[in-house]
Amino acid sequence: MRAWVRQSKESQGGWADIDEAALPDRPLLLDVSHSALNYKDALAIAGRSPIFRSFPMIPGIDVVGTVISDETGTFAAGSRIIATGSGMGETSMGGFAQRVRLDPDWAVAVPQDMPAANAAAVGTAGVTAALSVLALQDFGIKLETGPVLVTGATGGVGGFSVSLLAALGHEVIAVTGRLAESDYLKSLGASQIVDRATLEGEPRPLGKELWPAAVDVAGGKILANVLSNLCYGGVVAASGLAQSLSLPTSVAPFILRGVSLLGIDSVYASKPRRERAWALIGDNLNPDHIEAMKSLHDFAEVDRLAPQLLDQQLRGRAVFEWR
């Protein structure tokens, strides 16, 4: 079978024919139809960060396909499923292959009316966005609370966050460094567009109270500035490091305005949490928005697209299929 594989820490990765017996000993065997390019996948493929924890390793933290067999009986043969995170592409071989073996607990059924390519487009990005929105809801953010700021809005997590929040009736302020995409962001539901540059300066301990809630995928100075401009009692759901792993802030927003910073992890989210996220997606995510965010490619284009994602040259979600 074909797979993008890196055999050792010292070797270069690439496409190769490998034996199915090389797959890990896990109970569910999946015939892969689609996957998508995530930030961690791109880092690993471009060699910019040591994402792989063991070798040989296949990237692809999202995978969609048809069940060939499941020794646990959780899924029947022929079922369409999607698995996200759970260490795939880091500690267990991921979805950039024609077949994959995984644990059934990592997977959920693809929503009945959702095409496989759209499920892959949603993938980890959509689940992360849904978990972020659910975290804000659980915190107590309501429509009357006020607008919700979303950073990295032209990316996957940001775009799905804009769409979901708008579908739920929230006023959404979208932050982007690509103002030429303003019409696209408004089509997803954003009511206001903010230039990312306004959040890239040196953070002040406290700024003006501008927004009560935010979804952040950037980290770094952007997240620090978002925190310093939160309203009293405000909250940020943070899930990414697109700008930086660092957070150059102070305790001022926390102890003087009582703000909260909620960490969002989709990789090891429990199955009930992921099922709750997919229920939110199935009920509220506009299929037209998925189409607008999705670009469909042959798996062979993985190496070309990975650096573009890291350099923030891609919009939405790059989805791969076997051709």
Image: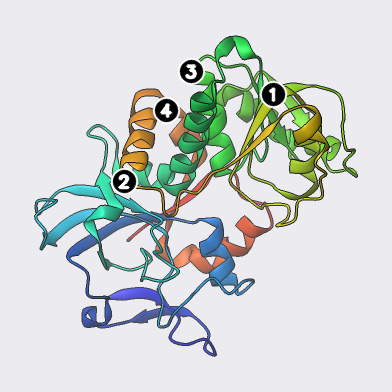
Give the residue furthest to the front.
Answer: 255
In the image, residue 275 above or below residue 10: above
Q: Which residue is mark 1?
A: 233
Q: Residues within 10 Å of mark 1 (few under 14, many from 20)?
A: some
Query: Whole-percent x and y of residue 302?
Result: 49, 64
- Identified by mark 2, the residue type is Lys
- Identified by mark 4, the residue type is Leu
Please state which of residues 78 and 25 is positioned toward the viewer in this rendering: 25
Distance (Cα) linking label 2 and label 1 = 30 Å
Q: Find numbered disc 2 in the image and state the secondary structure of the residue it sits on.
A: helix
Q: Residues within 10 Å of mark 3 (few under 14, many from 20)?
A: some
Distance (Cα) linking label 3 and label 1 = 22 Å
- Identified by mark 1, the residue type is Gly
Please tell me which residue is depicted at 49% across the width and 42% down the height of the picture.
128
Please state which of residues 102 and 17 is positioned toward the viewer in this rendering: 102
Please tell me which residue is depicted at 24% across the width and 49% down the height of the picture.
81
Distance (Cα) linking label 4 and label 2 = 20 Å
The label on residue 271 is: 2
Q: Which residue is mark 4?
A: 285
Distance (Cα) linking label 4 and label 1 = 28 Å
Which is more N-terminal, label 4 or label 3?
A: 3
- Identified by mark 3, the residue type is Leu
In the image, residue 59 above or below residue 13: above
Q: Residues within 10 Å of mark 2 (few under 14, many from 20)?
A: some
Looking at the rendering, which quadrant does residue 250 occupy? Answer: top right
Q: Residues within 10 Å of mark 4 (few under 14, many from 20)?
A: many
The label on residue 168 is: 3
